[in-house]
Amino acid sequence: MSAPSDAAPAVSAPAPTTTAAASSGGFTFKLHPLVIVNVSDHHTRVKAQAACSGDSSSSSSAAGAGAGAGQPPRVFGCVIGVQRGRTVEIFNSFELVLDPVSGTLDRAFLEKKQELYKKVFPDFYVLGWYSTGSDVHDTDMQIHKALMDVNESPVYLLLNPTINLSQKDLPVTIYESELHVIDGSPQLIFVRSNYTIETVEAERISVDHVAHLKPSDGGSAATQLAAHLTGIHSAIKMLNSRVRVIHQYLVAMQKGDIPVDNSLLRQVSSLVRRLPAMESQKFQDDFLMEYNDTLLMTYLAMFTNCSSTMNELVEKINTSYERPTTRRGGRGAFM
C-alpha cells in the first residue's frame, strides 16, 4: 500500500460516469449486515441534522456533495474487510470527511481511522467506499480514483435510501471499476457486481434484536405482535416459494425437459438431509419431551405468580385490619 498524499487531486470537469450492466472481473462479494446498518444510520443522522439546521449542504462535513436542492444530503465512507483470492468479504465501514465544494477527501482523517481500525482488526483492509443515492453521480468517479492509492481496485457500495414498497431486493448495489474503450479512448467506468449476504452468529442476534425493538411511538403489544406475526408469515411465504421453485426444477429434470445437473442434485440432497425426520419415533419422543417440559415450566411460572399475588393480598388484609390499640406486652392483634 503506497503512502497517501496530503490531498486528492480535484478534477475540474469530470467526464460523465458510465456504468455497465455486469462485471467481468470474476470476484465474489460477501456483504455483512453491519455495513448496511452503518450506512443507513449514517444517512439517517445526517438527514436529521439537516432537517434541524435547515441547511442540508452544511449539515455534516461528510455529506452534501452531489445533493441537489430539496434532496437529502449524500453521505460517504469507507468499507473494510478481507480479500481471499477472488472472494471479497465486506465486514464493516466507517465515515469519511469530504469537502463538498472541491470534492477532496480529508487524508489525515482517513489515515487516523485506518490506524485505529488496524489496532482492533489487524486483518481488515480498506476495500473501497460507500455512498447514498438512487444512481451513480458524475463526481463519484473522482472519489473512486482518489482511493486508488489506498486500494488499486476499490469497490463502490451504493445504498438507495428511497423507500420503494414494491421492491423486494435490498436497495444496495456494489460496483467495480473496469477500463473500457469508449469512442476510441480508454475510460474507467463502473460495472455492477453480484453479491450475497453473509452473517455470523453475533450479527444474527443483533439484527434480530433491532427488528424486535419497541416502536418509538409506544405501539401497543397487539401492534408489536401483529408486526411479529407478519414477519413470520413473510418468512414462511418466502420459504414456500423457494421450495416450490426447487420442486418444479426437480420435476422438470426428472421429465427430461432440462439436462441433469449432478452438482445441483448433490446440493439439494444435502439440503434435504438437514431437515429433521418428522415421522421418526425419536423425533416424536424428543418433541413430546420438549413440549411437556415447556408446559411444566409454564405451570410452575403460573403457580409462582399466583402464590406471590396471594401473599401480597394477605399482607394487605393484615395491614388493613390491624387494630390501632396495643395489648399488654406490646403485641398487636392481627387476623
Image: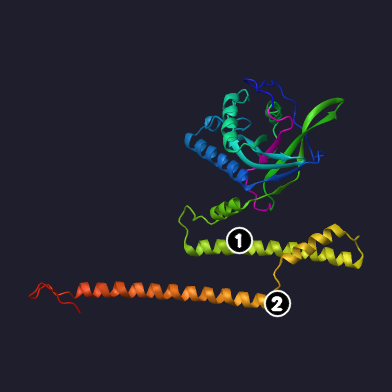
Question: Nearest the camera: 133 or 78?
Answer: 78
- Highlighted range, magenta: 150-167
Give the alpha-carbon distance from disc 2 to disc 1, as whole Å.
Answer: 30 Å
Q: SS class of the residue under badge 1?
A: helix
Q: Nearer the viewer, residue 69 or 120?
A: 120
The answer to whether residue 70 is seen in the rendering is: no
The label shown at residue 280 is 2
The crowding category of the residue bearing disc 1, from other C-alpha atoms within 10 Å (few below 14, some 14 to 19, many at least 20), is few
* Residue that badge 1 annotates: 231
Q: Nearer the viewer, mark 2 or mark 1?
A: 2
Residue drawn at 65 percent across, 77 percent down: 284
Residue type at numbered disc 2: Ser
Q: Are marks 2 and 1 in contact (CB under 8 Å)?
A: no
Q: Is residue 290 visible?
A: yes
Relative to residue 203, is residue 315 depicted above or below? below
Secondary structure state at the residue bearing disc 2: loop
- On screen, residue 15 versus residue 253, left or right, reads left
